[in-house]
Amino acid sequence: MILGPIVSRYELPDCKILNDKVASFLYSVKELQSKSDVVSNRKGWQRNDLQSMPQLQSLLTLIGKEFEKFVYETLEPRASCDFILGNLFCNINPPGAYHVPHIHEGDFTGVYYIKAPKDSGKLRLIYPHQCSSTARLQRLFKNIKLEERIEPEEGVGYFFPTYLNHYVEENLSDDDRISISYNINIKEK
């Protein structure tokens, strides 16, 4: 049974070579288009609408398989579904960069970590059903939370509903954190 926000973790095995290729490609895009598409990113670099780039298709295929597995194994749909991955964007967050609170469009949002040094900023998902009672209970019980704090790990990704307001803490490491984020819509076949 699922109660509360749905947050699903996935891991892409043996992804080091793929992550290195994707990181190299993203750095080359940044070099050519140094102006950031500032949406939620502050002091970092963000580029939107990368879903049609051939250099990212291997990664997108793997993410798509993970999302399909999540939908069919966890959500147990009542009908056959199609998944449309749109607005794939990347974030290169150097030391000091962070993301302000925001939400996405679509049904689900995802993030996948290409490069994630220690202390490079946790993803914080804010639960929408907060009130004074929840705050009081959160102080009393360890497993009642007002938000989820996710430590980024290379080769790991997460899916969560787009209605979850979220942000990313400041990168306190000495290196870049690189992530790919995307929105997914689900339609009945």
Image: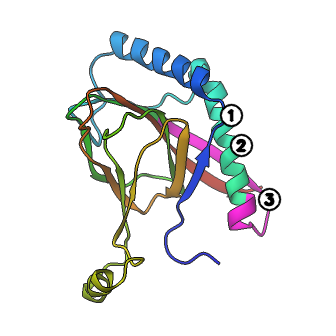
Compared to residue 6, the image places residue 171 above or below, namely above
- Residue hosting label 1: 61
Find numbered disc 1 in the image and state the secondary structure of the residue it sits on.
helix
Q: Which residue appears at 74% of the width and 67% of the height? A: 76
The region drawn magenta spans 72-88
The residue to which callout 3 is attached is: 80
Badge 1 density bin: few <14, some 14–19, many ≥20, Cα 10 Å: few
Mark 3 vs mark 2: which is more N-terminal?
2
Question: Marks 1 and 2: CB-CB under 8 Å?
Answer: yes
Choose between 170 and 64: the one closer to the eye.
Answer: 170
Q: Is mark 2 on a helix, strand or loop?
A: helix
Q: Earlier in the sequence, mark 3 or mark 1?
A: 1
Which of discs 3 and 2 lies nearer the camera? The answer is 2
* Rendering coords of residue 40 (x, y %): 29, 43
- State the separation of the CA atoms marked 3 and 2: 15 Å
Residue type at numbered disc 2: Lys
The label number, if any, that marks residue 65 in the structure image: 2
Spatial distance from mark 1 to mark 2, Cα to Cα? 6 Å
Q: Position of residue 121 (x, y in %)?
A: 31, 44
Q: Which residue: 44% across, 20% down?
A: 26
For the residues marked 3 and 1, what is the alpha-carbon distance in whole angstroms?
Answer: 19 Å
Extreme bottom residue here? 133
Q: Where is residue 141 in the image (x, y as percent from the top left)?
A: 36, 83
Q: What label does residue 69 carry, if any?
A: none
* Closer mark to the observer between disc 3 and disc 1: 1
- Residue at x-position 33% and y-position 27%: 176
Quarter of the image for residue 172 reads top left
**The disc labelled 1 sits on which kind of residue?**
Thr
The quadrant of the picture occupied by the C terminus is bottom right
